[in-house]
Image (cartoon, rainbow, N blue to C red):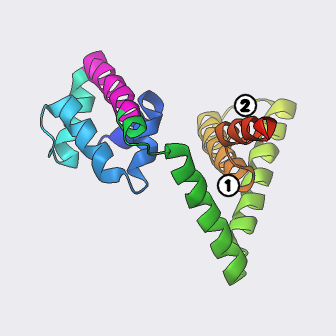
Amino acid sequence: MSFDWKGALKTVAPALATALGGPLAGVAVKSISDSVLGKPDGSEDEIAQAIQSGGADALLKLKQAEQQFILDMKKLDVDIEKLHADDRANAREREVKTGDKTPAILAGVITIGFFGILGYMLKYGTPEHGGEALLILLGALGAAWGSVVQYYYGSSAGSARKDELMRKK
């Protein structure tokens, strides 16, 4: 199994990681490659190897690349949060237009699974066998539940911005 550099990126440089999944992916990859390889056109394998073997130095370079990426986007007047909000709005619009119940069903399953396992563990503790797997599942469901909340209710950053705009009116 190869090193999941994108997973590591989510922790160290979340703005760059988020950009990888949207219209700014090319800019983000160039920035990441430049920071850890010293060249803008590194392959995913090269980037993964550099991050995995680079230790704290590679993580620091990624954090610096993220800060520069955010500054560059501000200079270009690119509102990253608006891009993500538009992406969520498009997904919601698609769901309404097609009548697709899959997102709602998945959201329900994830919510029930997360709180069901959490409740089980609060009542009975971690089982003697398979406890580690249950903790991993709980973590994955917790992360997925955060995405569900963001999908249906938006991010707290977007909410704070909306509140600020409303106060100005």
Q: Residue furthest right?
A: 123
The residue range painted magenta reads 55-71
Q: Quadrant of the C terminus?
A: top right
Q: Amino acid at mark 2?
A: Thr
Q: Secondary structure at mark 2?
A: loop
Q: From what the image shows, is residue 102 above or below residue 79?
A: below
- Decide whether the magenta segment is chiefly helix, strand or loop: helix
Q: Which residue is mark 2?
A: 126
User: Badge 2 local density, few (<14 within 10 Å), some, or many (20+)?
Assistant: some
Q: Quadrant of residue 2?
A: top left
Q: Can you tell which mark lies on residue 151?
A: 1
On the picture, is 162 further left or further right than 8? right
**Residue nearest the viewer, comparing 118 with 35:** 35
The one nearer the camera, 72 or 102, is 72
> Left or right of 124: which side holds 146?
left
Taking the image as shown, residue 44 lies to the left or right of residue 67, namely: left
User: What percent of the width, then of the height, locates residue 69?
Assistant: 35, 34
**Measured from the top left, where is residue 116 in percent x and y?**
81, 46
